[in-house]
Image: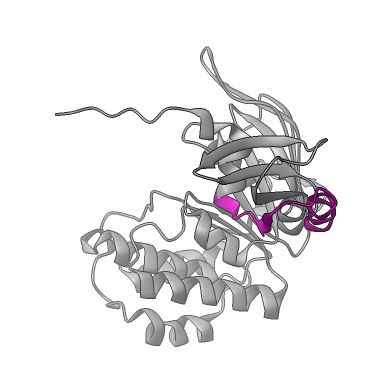
Amino acid sequence: MIQVTDLTKRFGSFTALDTLNMTVPQGAVYGLVGPNGAGKSTVIRHITGIYRPDSGTVTVDGEKVYENPKIKGRIGYIPDDIFYFPSATLEEMRKFYKGIYPHFDDALFEKLYDVFELPKKGQLRRFSKGMQKQAAFHLTLCTRPDYLILDEPVDGLDPVMRRQVMSLVMSDVAQQGTTVLISSHNLRELEDVCDHVGIMDGGKMLLERSLADMQGNTVKLQLSGEAPEGLEILHKSVSGRLTTLIVRGTAEEITARAQAANLPYFDVLPLSLEEIFIYELGGINEKVKDILL
C-alpha cells in the first residue's frame, strides 16, 4: 500500500502540495487526475523517492521511500519526460537496470522484442518520442515491480501501441498482483483500467474513492416536466423540453424519486469519469473563451 500523509512541498514561495493525503490500496489500479498544475507529478516524485518531503510522510508498505534503496528496487517508474544516458542503447540500458533491480527478468526482456520491435543497438536518443516511450515500458516491465508508477504513460504512442502497453500492464496486475498508479489526462482510457480514482487540485486531494462508488453516487437525470423535490443538483441544463440534471444519489434512489413524481419522461444514466472530473471541479461553469484571430 502507498500511503501519503499530510505531505507538503514548497518551491520558494510556491506551495506545490498542501498537506496532501492519499492512499493507493494494495493491488489497485489507481488513476490520479487533476488539471495542469494540480501537483500530480510532484506527488509522484515523492512516491518514487526523488523529492524529499518538506513535511508529512510518504510510505510504501509502511516504509519511508526517500533514500530507501530496498523500497525503490520494488518500484517501476515511467515519467512523462523519459531520460536515458546520452549514447546508450537498449541493451546497455538493460545492463544498467539489472544492476539496480534485483528481480530483472531477462527472459521477459527477450520476449518483449517481439512486442515493441525496437533496434537492439540503436542509440535511444535517436529514437522518436514514441519509440523512447516503448523502450521505457520494455525496460520497466522487466524489473518485475511490486509497484508501477506511470506519469502520462501513453503520451506519444499511437492508438494500437497504447492498447498494447496497457494490455501488458493489466496482464502484470492479473498475474503478479502489481499495484499501479497512473497519472493521465486521458480520462477515457483511465476509466477502462482503473478501479480507484483520486482527483487533485491546488496541491490537495479533493476526492478519493473507488470508481464504482464515484459512478454509483452521482448520476445524470434527463427528464421532461418539473424536477422532483429534494434532489441535490450539481448542474442543470435545458434543451427544448428536455432538462438534464447532474444529481447526487444512486441510480435506484433517483429512479424511485422520478417515478414518484409521475414525470412524462425520464432517464437515469451513469456519469463517465470525465464528467465526474468536470463536475467535481466545477469546471462546467467556467466559460470557454472564444478568441477570433
Q: Residue furthest left?
A: 293
Residue 131 in view of the camera: yes
Q: Nearer the viewer, residue 88 or 40?
A: 40
Q: Is residue 104 above or below residue 21?
A: below
Q: Quadrant of the N terminus?
A: bottom right
Q: Nearer the viewer, residue 109 or 266?
A: 266
**Quarter occupied by residue 126:** bottom left
Residue 45 in view of the camera: no
Q: Nearer the viewer, residue 149 or 249?
A: 249
What percent of the width, then of the height, locates residue 249?
A: 80, 47
Q: Quadrant of the C terminus?
A: top left
What percent of the width, then of the height, locates residue 133?
A: 37, 62
What percent of the width, then of the height, locates residue 168?
A: 53, 76
Would residue 58 appear left or right of 187 to someone viewing this image?
Answer: right
Would residue 286 appear left or right of 280 to someone viewing this image?
Answer: left
**Quarter occupied by residue 154:** bottom left
Q: Is residue 118 above or below residue 201?
A: below
Please report the residue visible at 57 percent of the width from the left and 73 percent of the height from the top. 104
How is the protein colored in the picture? one colour
Q: Is residue 14 magenta?
A: no
Span colored in magenta:
251-274
**Quarter occupied by residue 94:** bottom left
Please report the residue visible at 33 percent of the width from the left and 59 percent of the height from the top. 156
Q: Is residue 252 magenta?
A: yes
